[in-house]
Amino acid sequence: MYDSVIIGSGAAGSTVARKLAESGKNVLVLEKRPHIGGNCYDRPDAYGIVIHEYGPHIFHTNEEEVFRFLSEFTEWRLFGHEVVANVHGTPLPVPFNLNTLHKVYGKEKADRLEALLVDEYGAGSRVPIMELKKNKNPEIEAIADYVYENIFLHYTMKQWGQTPEEIDPEVTGRVPVLLSYDNRYFQDKYQGMPKDGYTAMFEKMLAHQNITVETHTGCKDCMAFLENKVLYKGIEFTGDVVYTGALDELFDCEYGRLPYRSLDFRFEHFAQDSFQGRSVVNYTVSEDFTRITEFKYLTGQTDAHGTTIVKEYPFSYTGAEGEIPYYAILNDENRALYEKYKAKLAPLKNVYLLGRLAEYKYYNIDAIVKEALKLSDTIRR
Ligand code: UDP
C-alpha cells in the first residue's frame, strides 16, 4: 500500500518524503523518537523558552534551490550569526579574522601582520588553521601558533578527544582563519532560523495527503533487511526505502560499532533577562564544556521571562540506551568499517542511504537538504 518507506524524519527524511509525496507516491515515514525533525527538533521548555533539544542549529546556505524549497514551509528570521571565543575572559571574534587580529595584537602590529597575511594569501581568503601552521614566515608562524593554541587545540581536544593534527582536516577547516573584517561565523548568503522554529517547518513539510508519519516506531519494529530483499510487516517490500539512521545498527553492529562523538546537553534556566548577552560563546582555553548557547538570541524570542542556556559536554558514544551519535569520527579506519556495512546493502537496489548518520558524514543542514532533493529526483526517475 506504500510506494516508499522513509526511515527517519530529520532534514534528510522529511525532505525526501515531501518530494516523493508531491510526485504522487504514497509515503510512510518511520520515526523512532516521539517527535519529528531529527536533531533540529525545537520546543518550548518548562519556562516557555524555545530551546533546541539537540544543540544549536543555525541554518545557513548559498544554495538558492535549498533556500527556495525550505521557504515553502517557513518564513525566516534571518541574521548574521556571530560567535566569540572566551579566551581567558576576553571575548574574541571566531572565526579568527582581521578584527580578532587587531584585538589580539593592537593597531600598529596588527596593521603590519594584516599586510603580511593579505600579501601571502589574498584579501578575503579563508585559510584553514592547519594550512596556516605550515607557513615558514616566523611572524605568520607566530599568528598560527596563537590561533592554534587559543582557538583550536583545547576546544578540539574537548570535542573530539584528539588534537587538530589527529582529526580530519575537513573538521577544523570548517572554521578557517578569515582575512576579512567579517565577524559572522558563516559567510553564506542566507543565515538564520525558521521564524516559528524547525519543528513547525518540518511539520508543515510532512503535512501532505500522501505522507503517513509513525513516531515511536523503530524501523526494526516493522521492517527486516535480509540478504536480498527488504520485508515490511513480514512481506517483501519492493518500493523505495530511504534509510537515514546509523548504518551499523541496521545490522546489529555485527562488525563492531561505527565510532561517533556524542554530547551531553546540560540546560540551565535563569530568572534574569540575559546570561551572556549573545547567542553562542565558545570556551576555547578553559572549562569542560565546549560552548554555551543562549537560545533567546538565536530565536529572537521576546515573549518569555528569564533565559535558558545549554552547555555542551562531549564524550565518546558507546551505544548505551539514551546516548545519541552526533558526529561521525572521520578517518580511514572508520570509513573502511562504514564501507563494510555499506557493502552488505549492495544487493538491495531499492535501499538508499541518506544523511549524517547513514552516510557517516559531517553534513550541514543545507547540504543534507540538497542531497535529499537530488536523491528524490533519482528515485522519481
Ligand atoms: N573549532 C575549534 N574552536 C572553535 C570552533 C571550532 O577548535 O572555537 C574546531 C573544533 O574541532 C570543531 C570544528 O572546529 O569540532 C568545527 O567547528 P563547528 O563550529 O563547525 O562545529 P559544530 O557546530 O558542527 O559542532
Image (tube, grey):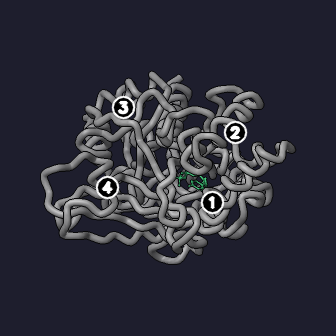
The three-letter amino acid code for the residue at tag 3 is: Leu
Query: Badge 2 is on which residue?
Result: 113
First reached walking from the N terminus: tag 1 or tag 3: 3
- Quarter containing the N terminus: top left
Separation (CA) of disc 4 from disc 2: 31 Å
Residue 203, image x and y in percent? 27, 44
**Lateral position of residue 41 relative to residue 185, left or right:** left
Separation (CA) of disc 3 from disc 4: 29 Å
Q: Is residue 279 above or below residue 20?
A: below
Residue 149, image x and y in percent? 68, 60
Query: Badge 3 is on which residue?
Result: 70
Query: Badge 1 is on which residue?
Result: 150
Residue 309, image x and y in percent? 33, 64
Residue ranking furthest to the right: 136
The three-letter amino acid code for the residue at tag 2 is: Leu
Graded by Cα atoms within 10 Å as few (under 14), some (14 to 19) or many (20 or more), the crowding at tag 2 reads some
Q: Residue at x 52, y 77 (%)?
A: 320
Q: Is residue 87 above or below residue 106?
A: below
